[in-house]
Image (cartoon, rainbow, N blue to C red):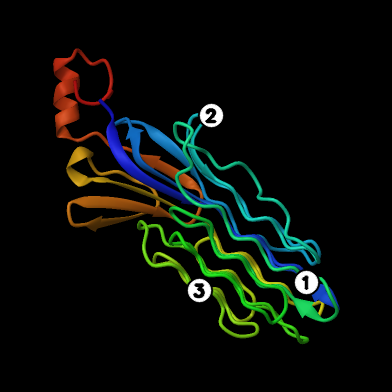
Amino acid sequence: MAIPAVVVVVGGGGEGSSTTSAGGGARGGDLRNDSAMAIIPGETLTVTVGAGGTGGTTPGGDGGASQVLRGATVLLSAAGGGGGTVAASRSQNGTSTTIAGTVTGGTGGAGGTGTGSVTAGGGGGAGGYSAAGGAGSQGDVAAAASTGGGGGGGRGNGSVLTAGGGGGVGLGGAGANGAAGATAGVRGDGGSGGTGGTATAVGGTYGGGGGGDDTGTTAGDGGPGGVRIRYLTTDLGTCTGGTATVDGSYTYHDFTASGSFYAAPNATHLVEDTVGGGIGFGGRR
């Protein structure tokens, strides 16, 4: 049989928008979590990590989707955050998967609008483990905290300044909710161990949406996406890919850039393969 692994994917946050009078915040990236993905000893999986949105003014650039694939088959996917516009942030970039028809994770929070004279909208927080990230706010009004372990929304700004970036989300499982930005232009906090956005509108790690800007110069980039693959250390051999960390009885591999994960067979698999006539590393028989 295959080896169960816990896999978390977070899409990159979108980039906020910038004009000389108003700029809206971007959406945070989605999060998806598979608590028992079937990993086959001996196989290599492709890992795609979505980048945070960059490079635009209005609209801001979309964040990239993060995925784990077996060949051409997508096993798990989290959409990137839509870039900011003067009005509402754009729709998410890509499709987030469901498992047996069930959503296992949260959608990135919406960015705050920049509609109106001299206003900037805050970035949306990254999606949480059981609910959406917090929404950014328009102008100097209250943003929203997350409710499912995601990032908090960045607070907008009603003067000629940038808005706060949305908070990111951690890869280690559900934790504390990210708080919303408390005052004008203040970032949203990270949820579940993620980092907060910045007061210069950049979205937090992983997946925070960038804040808007009403000076026409400095819209915030989206926070980067990320992927974690975690398994019982004794179930596999010395696996490769990403940055590997041993944590008690488990090993996890964090990916902050696209690459591949090789699920190395251990001695048990090798012996069983020999006994079974060399039919391949199909798991324990």
Can residue 219 be seen here?
Answer: no
**Kind of residue at disc 3:** Gly
| Image coordinates for residue 189, horizontal then vertical, percent | 49, 74
* Disc on the earlier residue, 2 or 1: 2
Which quarter of the picture shows residue 60?
A: bottom right
Quick check: marks 2 and 1 in contact, CB under 8 Å? no
| Mark 2 residue crowding within 10 angstroms, few (<14) / some (14–19) / many (20+) | few
**Camera-side mark, 1 or 3:** 1
**Kind of residue at disc 1:** Gly
Gap between marks 3 and 2 measured at Cα: 34 Å
In the image, taking residue 219 as reference, residue 100 lies left or right, namely left
**Camera-side mark, 3 or 2:** 3
**Residue behind mark 2:** 72
**Kind of residue at disc 2:** Ala
**Residue behind mark 1:** 114
Can residue 275 be seen here?
Answer: yes
Q: Which is nearer the eye, 40 or 160? A: 160
Where 220 sits versus 96, above or below? below
* Disc on the earlier residue, 1 or 3: 1
Residue farthest along the top direction in this orientation: 277
In the image, taking residue 279 as reference, residue 203 lies left or right, namely right
Which quarter of the picture shows residue 263?
A: top left
Where 15 sits versus 196, above or below? above
**Residue behind mark 3:** 196
- SS assignment at label 2: loop
**Looking at the image, which residue is at 21% across and 46% down?**
233
* Disc on the earlier residue, 3 or 2: 2
Gap between marks 1 and 3 measured at Cα: 21 Å
